Each structure stands twice: as C-alpha cells, then as structure tokens.
Image (cartoon, rainbow, N blue to C red):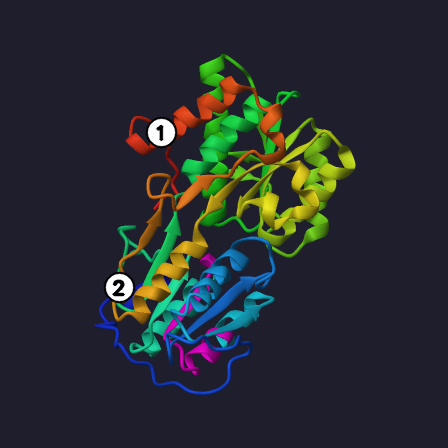
Amino acid sequence: MHRAAVIRLGAVLAASALAVTACGEAPEETDAGSEGDDFVGCMVTDEGGVDDKSFNETSHRGLVNAHDAGTISDVQVAESHSTADFEPNVSSMVSQECGLIVTVGFMLADATADAAESNPDERFAIVDFQYTDEDSGEPVTIDNVKPLVFNTHEAAFLAGYLAAGYSETGTVATWGGAKIPTVTIFMDGYYDGVQHYNEVHDADIEVLGWDKESQDGQFTDDFSNSSLAQQYSENLIQQGADVIMPVAGPIGESAAVAARDAGDVALIWVDTDGYESLPEYSDLILTSVVKGMDTAVEEAVEATADGEYSPDPFVGTLENEGVSIAPYHDFSGEIDDELAEEVAELEQQIIDGELEVQSDAAF
C-alpha cells in the first residue's frame, strides 16, 4: 500500500533546496512571531482536523510550539475531512510560501510523495509513514521528505501488561479505525503485553478485538464512524472487557461514552495523554500510549528553519522518549505497587534491549 509512488520516485528526487518560492494565502493561519522571520510552518491533517484530541492535534501542537518559541514566523493549516481532501490540500500548501510542509498520517503517503516528486525544491515531513521499496521492503529515502515515525508497540506492550494486571473480569479489548500499520502496531504491542503478563503470572487474560498471529480484528475502516465505534465498544463490554484501548483518533471517544454508560470500565487512550486531551472522561483513563509527535514535528521544523533539513527518519522509541506510557493519574491508588514496579522494570528491559518487543509494523 502506498508504494507506487516510491517506485516512481526511486531515482528522480536528487536533492532538496533551501529556499521555497511559492505564494498565495493559506486556508488557516496564526499571527507571526517576532523571530523566525519569513519561515512558515505548514501542515495538512488527516481526517478529523486539528481538534481530534489525537494525532492531528498533537502534530499541530509541534508547529504551534515552534511558532510560540519564535522559531518560525507563521503557521498555516489545511484540514482534511475526507480522503478526497488529501491531494488538493497538499497542493494548496505547495502553492504557499512554506518552509516545511508537514503531512499527518499514513493515509497521506501517496499525496505527499506525488507532491514531492513534482516539487523537488519543496521540503516535506510526514508523520507516521516511511516509504519502502515494493520488492525488498527496505526503507527508501526521498530527498525532500522526512519520515517521523514511532515504534508505539513498545509502549503499548506496557499498556497491555498493565491492562491485564488491572482487569478484574479477565478480559480486555482493543479495536481500531482503519486497518493500517500505524494502527495495528499499537494493537500488536497491546496483545503481546497481555500475553507476557499471562506467562509471568500463569494467568489467562483474554484479548478481544485483535489477534496478532492472524492479524485480524475489529475495525471501523475509517476515523469518522462514531456510531459504529460506540457499537463495537458496547459489544466488547458486553463480552466482559473491563479495559478497552481504541486506536482510532477522534472516534476513540465513543469508547469513553460506552465505558461511562457501562460503569467499571477503564480506557487506555493513544497518541496523547487522554487524561489531559479528554478531560470530560479523565476519570476513565487508566493510562495512555503516547507518541511524541509534537516534539518530532517541532524539532523537524526548527532544524529546517536553521538550514539543517535532513530526510533521515526520526524513529520514536522508549529509549529516546519518542513513545511512552502516561502516568496513571486517578488510577494511581488502584494499581498495586507490585504491578506498577513490574511495568517500570519491563520498560527498562525494553530500553536496555533485554526484552525485545516485535511487530511487523515496526520501523
């Protein structure tokens, strides 16, 4: 998926220039800062827009932080509300005076690659995607596209272990939006974390909604069908799940609605710390699998503004704190000290390389 563009781009893109000469008005902008004159940070979101309480919002925060720090003079955003918006939104940003265009999400891979091929002097960064060769599967470098990717399975492993140790029903669950690698990587880690808990404690905690071996599970097939998302969550709760991890951007909130209605059901949020990004449901958030997309975007735009743009990928891990597990917040008193210590020890083992967490979707 999304590899046709790689084949076309293989030997075409030779270099990225340090100046951008497009012009026009952006769909949305904020006031210029006092420093970083004439450098505009631009973004095209995936479905859900900048207020999705998930990956779009977190990525956008990276640009805002760079602007607030005076690193860049302006922020311009094109929000996508469906897949049909991707190509025209990327094209609209190419026509602006952008120092760096950040596209958010796996689904924007083709539109980004096409624009990069047609505009070799434009600089891009893409969140959650790394181009690969169709035959070998090896990473392919596009000279004017910087991948910002995250091995979220490492942190999700910890969340799965925690969920298994916290569950009182012996059943936990997960479900996803689109069945794409940047979603299933969370589910792989979560599943393996539960299995590791079972091995350590001779337990039999069941995972509903995803089977890592068969790579089969429950998906809404988009990030917009909140009704189906709530239905899935309710069904999983009816089957006994008392911890649910939705991996679905804004419609993950439907799982919180279902959990609130059911009572005694905890949620594991993804991408951001759900305790902060979903305050109306903060009392339901057991923990979150956090991706440092804001930091990755901010560092990419700052480097570009400083004349140090590089297409080398950023890969977030537990070791470099590009991914993490959030604090337990209101649940701190409900998680026994032994379980908390085990999760902390597992985190260090993964960082030290003593414990290897695997996913076919890993970077």
Q: Is residue 254 above or below residue 157?
A: below
Q: Secondary structure at mark 1?
A: helix
Question: Which residues fall within the magenta stretch?
Answer: 89-106
- Of all residues shown, which one is farthest toward the right? 261
Q: Is residue 192 above or below residue 87?
A: above
Image coordinates of residue 229 in percent, x first then y, are 67, 47
Q: Secondary structure at mark 2?
A: loop
- Which of the 4 quarters of the picture holds residue 283? top right
Residue 135 or residue 327, whichever sits in front: 327
Q: Which residue is mark 1?
A: 348
Residue 180 or residue 237, whichever sits in front: 237
Image coordinates of residue 123 in percent, x first then y, are 33, 72
Q: Residue sitting at 39 percent across and 85 percent down?
A: 22
- Of all residues shown, which one is farthest toward the front? 34
The residues tagged by marks 1 and 2 sit, at their Cα atoms, a distance apart of: 30 Å
Q: Was residue 91 drawn as part of the magenta stretch in this picture?
A: yes
Of label 1 and label 2, which has the lower sequence position? 2
- The answer to whether residue 274 is visible is yes
The quadrant of the rendering that contains the N terminus is bottom left
Q: Residue sitting at 55 percent across and 76 percent down?
A: 28
The residue carrying pointer 2 sits among few (fewer than 14), some (14 to 19) or many (20 or more) residues within 10 Å by Cα, namely: some
Q: Mark 1 belongs to which amino acid?
A: Gln
The residue carrying pointer 1 sits among few (fewer than 14), some (14 to 19) or many (20 or more) residues within 10 Å by Cα, namely: some
Q: Mark 2 belongs to which amino acid?
A: Ser
Residue 265 or residue 199, whichever sits in front: 265
- Of all residues shown, which one is farthest toward the top? 202
Image coordinates of residue 92 in percent, x first then y, are 48, 79
- Does residue 95 appear left or right of residue 136 in this picture? right
Q: Which residue is mark 2?
A: 310
Q: Is residue 11 above or below residue 348?
A: below
